[in-house]
Image (cartoon, rainbow, N blue to C red):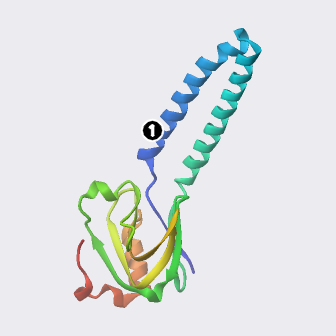
């Protein structure tokens, strides 16, 4: 049976994105509209093209705003699946997990605003909250556009932090040995 855990909403990003979209739309309408009524035929064609570009921008921003809300971790019978926004998706066997620990990465602000990586062995997925490090026995080849990274450590901050740790403890009990626990 699959258990799903969610990352916090990217509320800190949605407001600036909406502000940019609304501000740009108002600016475009105010500057392009006069050309439709009072401009030459060339001005009208440019204005129509400008409105087309504006609409494409609004559609892309809307798709992006929806995509940043689609973030979760799913623990299945023998697999852990991480899906973070539209940018990152991976899965690996639970048997590959050698260590699970709560960590307090420093500086904290660096690991609280979405997806981050060191491009060598770690990917962090967080919009805030306590961070759990999952270390793998062997690297998991993970696509993080535009390249592949051999990831051995995932830092995840899900809303249901305690339930996530309990589910991992139930399925991978050996990864929680006190001798293996450390902080970053």
Mark 1 residue element: helix
Quadrant of the rendered structure where residue 134 is?
Answer: bottom left
User: Is 35 left or right of 101, judged from the image as shown?
Assistant: right
Image quarter where the C terminus lies is bottom left
Image quarter where the N terminus lies is bottom right
Residue 166 coordinates in the image, percent (x, y): 39, 78
Q: Could you tell me which residue is drawn at 70 percent across and 28 percent down?
A: 49
Residue 80 appears anywhere in the view: no
Residue 37 coordinates in the image, percent (x, y): 72, 11
Residue, far front: 42
Q: Could you tell me which residue is drawn at 66 percent across and 13 percent down?
A: 34
Q: Could you tell me which residue is drawn at 57 percent across and 48 percent down?
A: 64
User: Is 182 left or right of 6, judged from the image as shown?
Assistant: left
Q: Nearer the viewer, residue 99 or 116?
A: 116
User: Is 73 left or right of 44, judged from the image as shown?
Assistant: left
- Total tally of numbered discs in the picture: 1
| Residue annotated with mark 1 | 16
**Picture layout, residue 88 above or below residue 180:** above
Q: Could you tell me which residue is drawn at 56 percent across and 24 percent down?
A: 26
Residue 11 coordinates in the image, percent (x, y): 44, 47
**Picture layout, residue 36 above or below residue 109:** above
Q: Nearer the viewer, residue 173 or 66?
A: 66
Residue, far right: 41
Residue, far top: 38
User: Is 179 left or right of 46, judged from the image as shown?
Assistant: left
Residue 70 coordinates in the image, percent (x, y): 55, 58
**Picture layout, residue 5 above or below residue 108:** below
Q: Residues within 10 Å of mark 1 (few under 14, many from 20)?
A: few
Residue 34 appears anywhere in the view: yes
């Amino acid at each position: 049976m699959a258990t799903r855990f969610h990352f916090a909403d990217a509320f800190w990003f949605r407001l600036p994105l909406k502000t940019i979209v609304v501000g740009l739309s108002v600016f475009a309408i105010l500057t392009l509209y006069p050309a439709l009524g009072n401009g030459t035929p060339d001005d009208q064609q440019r204005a129509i093209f400008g409105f087309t570009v504006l609409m494409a921008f609004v559609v892309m921003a809307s798709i992006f705003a929806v995509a940043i809300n689609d973030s979760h971790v799913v623990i299945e019978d023998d697999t852990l699946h991480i899906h973070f926004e539209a940018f990152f998706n991976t899965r690996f066997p639970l048997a590959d997990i050698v260590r699970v620990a709560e960590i307090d990465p420093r500086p904290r602000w660096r690991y609280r605003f979405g997806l981050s990586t060191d491009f060598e062995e770690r990917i962090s997925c967080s919009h805030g909250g306590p961070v759990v490090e999952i270390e793998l026995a062997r690297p998991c080849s993970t696509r993080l556009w535009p390249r592949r990274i051999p990831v051995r450590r995932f830092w995840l901050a899900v809303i249901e932090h305690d339930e996530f740790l309990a589910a991992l403890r139930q399925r991978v009990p050996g990864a929680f040995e006190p001798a293996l626990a450390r902080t970053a």
